[in-house]
Amino acid sequence: MTVFLIRRLLQTLAVLFAVSLVVFVGLYAVGNPADILLPDDATEVERQAAIRSLGLDQPLIVQYGLFLKNALSGDLGRSFVYNEPSIKLILARFPATLELALSALFIAMVLGFPLGLYAGLHPGTRMERAIMTGSILGFSLPNFWQGLMLILIFSIGLGWLPSSGRGQTGSLFGIETSFATWDGIRHLILPATNLALFKLALVIRLTRAQVRETMPLDFVKFGRARGLTERRIVGVHVAKTIAAPIVTVIGMELGSVIAFAVVTESIFAWPGMGKLIIDSINRLDRPVVAAYLLVITFLFILINLVVDLLYTALDPRVRLGGKS
């Protein structure tokens, strides 16, 4: 285990270094933020002064060296627009995005697992075909279109739910969250549902496939021969067998939900990292974009590590870092 963790730490450092290089070259070698930040009537003297103050007058290699040096101490630069540390802006928006991502995965798991289980246990029935057709729609329909339809139906048409914003937050176990107030939950339902639809389809199809593969196995036949009820066979033995691959996929999907919540946050004006990154790209706020990409990369690595550890706990046959 120690060898595994050390190897993962070294891999993390190498990946972050590679990502920082690609991000820096991709962002800092294209465009000039001064053209966007300054008004149209700014003089050339004011323009050159702004470029110097932002450090953009230095050669690219010098800028990257300063960026890397500051990054090692936790400083990913100051926002050109807000004049605040970029990492501070990212972390201030992170709770809202994490709240949205966890809600979406919760909806996907609570609905997807039983629907996929039913479809796997009852192949060829009308209900199974309806579930699988719905999962195909979840995969096929564009995320932005789903969001607009949810707003059109449940917000504009029926007037049941608000269409934008985070709503009122409250304190729950010392954490500021939307889950603490009814207004916050109402604002969370539509964006979380929109973000969950694709993952819901994924969970349904994954669970169904795992059940179909597991039911013909010998341990299921042996359980029936012993006189165990079908509910116990499915609820205990089959569920335990299919849990490991499902947890692995869902764990990795958490990173993608956090990273790709940009469309949902833009449609529903959700004040998370996704909306911040869109605004930063439009304004060429390079330090914020770089900080966002590095934070997302680190989250993917961290989630991947946690998933590996969970997989080991769920399946004792798997050993990390060497021979068992």
Image: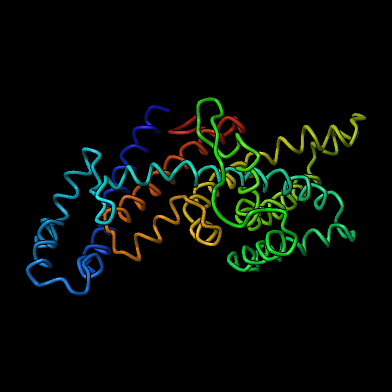
> What residue sits 80% from the left and 35% below the top?
235
Q: Position of residue 174 (x, y in %)?
A: 50, 26
**As rendered, which of 304 and 80 lies closer to the eye?**
80
Compared to residue 298, the image places residue 317 above or below, namely: above
Q: Residue furthest front?
A: 41
Q: Position of residue 98 (x, y in %)?
A: 51, 43
Left or right: 131 in relation to 79: right
Say which quarter of the image contains residue 220.
Answer: top right
Left or right: 4 in relation to 318: left
> What residue sits 61% from the left and 41% below the top?
247
Q: Residue furthest left?
A: 45
> What residue sits 63% from the left and 43% below the top?
183
Q: Residue furthest bottom?
A: 40
> What residue sits 15% from the left and 57% below the top?
54
Classify the position of the N terminus by image quarter.
top left
Compared to residue 170, the image places residue 246 above or below, namely: below
Q: Position of residue 16 (x, y in %)?
A: 31, 48
Left or right: 291 in relation to 230: left
Is residue 59 visible to the viewer in this orientation of the structure?
no
